């Protein structure tokens, strides 16, 4: 998991409409939402869901939100595909146009790091925006793709042949596994789960930040948390935390659709899913690099 990942500052969908991810109760009358096993059971849903509250103010019985202008699963899939597609295209272009041979690796790596820094800034700007800005999200994806293309090319050509494809397959496997487990109800996302994941992720990032500071000022691998057996261990921890954030992303999407979040919020879902998938991919790539460098 990358310490620059602004996933920790994501505050759910549309703050100005009152929907804030895990701080709201399920909508009454919605499909597959009930009190059995529900951590929010007993909370008045009309006091939490602004769309249901509008029904009460108009004297009408609570109804599911109208689909017109509301986010749907198709919207989420389309925006996520567009965002990931942008990232993949720029990664492929960076791989092809920024060689990593001995004569060009410094220049190519410098461009990749520069793109990553700008992508980080754009991601943080979007994270603190009240509404999703598609231009910011797609620009982040394009620049992050340049960084991933260069890094993947370095690892694949100079450390472990086939590493990029292995990391892609690993990321896809984690995504599919978490999605199946979430849909089957094996993963139950509630406030306790959310709190545990956020606390664990915060501790992980702080530990990696300390390791980075030691590496910058002390040289070498810092405290050794990103190399050798410890590096593999923390890489696995990073992948597990990334899988947990995927579950949180799926929960946000599911709740956003159930609450009738505005259609534009599908871009926020795409942004969050892209951040998490990049994070998981980087951890796989790091583990593969460590395993092959040890050999």
Image: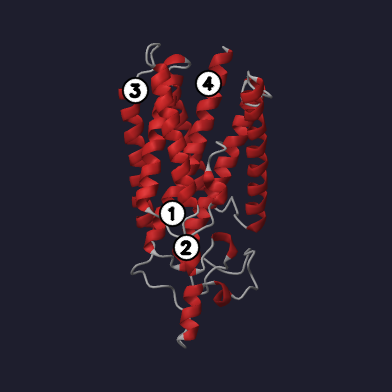
Residue carrying label 2: 14
Residue carrying label 3: 98
Looking at the rendered structure, the secondary structure element under dot 4 is helix
Give residue 220's position: percent from left, percent from top. 63, 18
Comes first in the chain, label 4 or label 3: 3
The mark closer to the camera, 1 or 4, is 1
Comes first in the chain, label 3 or label 1: 3
Cα gap from disc 3 to disc 1, whole angstroms: 31 Å
Give residue 59's position: percent from left, percent from top. 47, 88
Q: Is 200 placed left or right of 265 in the picture?
A: right
Labels 2 & 3 near each other (Cβ < 8 A) = no
- The mark found on residue 289 in the picture is 4
Dot 2: few (<14), some (14–19), or many (≥20) neighbours within 10 Å?
many
Q: Quadrant of the N terminus?
A: top right
Labels 1 & 2 near each other (Cβ < 8 A) = yes
One can see residue 152 in this view = no
Labels 3 & 1 near each other (Cβ < 8 A) = no
Nearer the observer, 116 or 287: 116
- The mark found on residue 268 in the picture is 1
Comes first in the chain, label 2 or label 3: 2
One can see residue 222 in this view = yes
Note whether 52 is above or below 280 in the view shown: below
Labels 4 & 3 near each other (Cβ < 8 A) = no
- What residue sits 54% from the left and 39% below the top? 4
Number of numbered callouts drawn: 4
Comes first in the chain, label 1 or label 4: 1
Labels 1 & 4 near each other (Cβ < 8 A) = no
- What residue sits 47% from the left and 63% below the top? 14
């Amino acid at each position: 998991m990358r310490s620059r990942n602004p996933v920790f500052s994501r505050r759910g969908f549309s703050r100005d409409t009152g929907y804030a991810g895990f701080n709201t109760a399920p909508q009454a009358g919605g499909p597959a939402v009930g009190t059995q096993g529900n951590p929010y059971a007993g909370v008045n849903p009309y006091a939490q869901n602004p769309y249901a509250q509008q029904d009460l103010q108009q004297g009408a019985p609570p109804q599911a939100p109208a689909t017109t202008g509301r986010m749907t699963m198709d919207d989420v899939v389309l925006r996520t595909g567009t965002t990931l597609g942008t990232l993949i295209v720029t990664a492929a272009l960076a791989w092809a146009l920024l060689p990593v041979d001995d004569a060009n690796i410094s220049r190519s790596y410098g461009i990749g790091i520069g793109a990553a820094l700008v992508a980080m800034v754009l991601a943080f700007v979007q994270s603190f925006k009240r509404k999703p800005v598609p231009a910011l999200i797609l620009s982040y994806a394009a620049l992050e793709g340049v960084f991933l293309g260069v890094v993947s090319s370095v690892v694949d050509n100079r450390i472990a042949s086939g590493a990029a494809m292995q990391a892609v397959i690993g990321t896809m496997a984690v995504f599919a596994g978490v999605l199946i487990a979430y849909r089957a109800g094996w993963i139950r996302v509630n406030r306790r789960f959310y709190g545990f994941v956020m606390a664990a992720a915060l501790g992980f990032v702080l530990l990696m930040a300390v390791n980075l500071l030691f590496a910058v000022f002390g040289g070498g691998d810092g405290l050794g948390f990103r190399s050798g057996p410890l590096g593999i261990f923390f890489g696995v921890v990073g992948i597990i935390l990334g899988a947990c954030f995927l579950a949180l992303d799926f929960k946000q999407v599911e709740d956003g659709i159930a609450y009738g979040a505005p259609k534009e919020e599908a871009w926020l879902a795409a942004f969050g899913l892209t951040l998490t998938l990049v994070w998981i991919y980087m951890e796989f790539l790091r583990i593969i690099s460590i395993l092959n460098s040890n050999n």
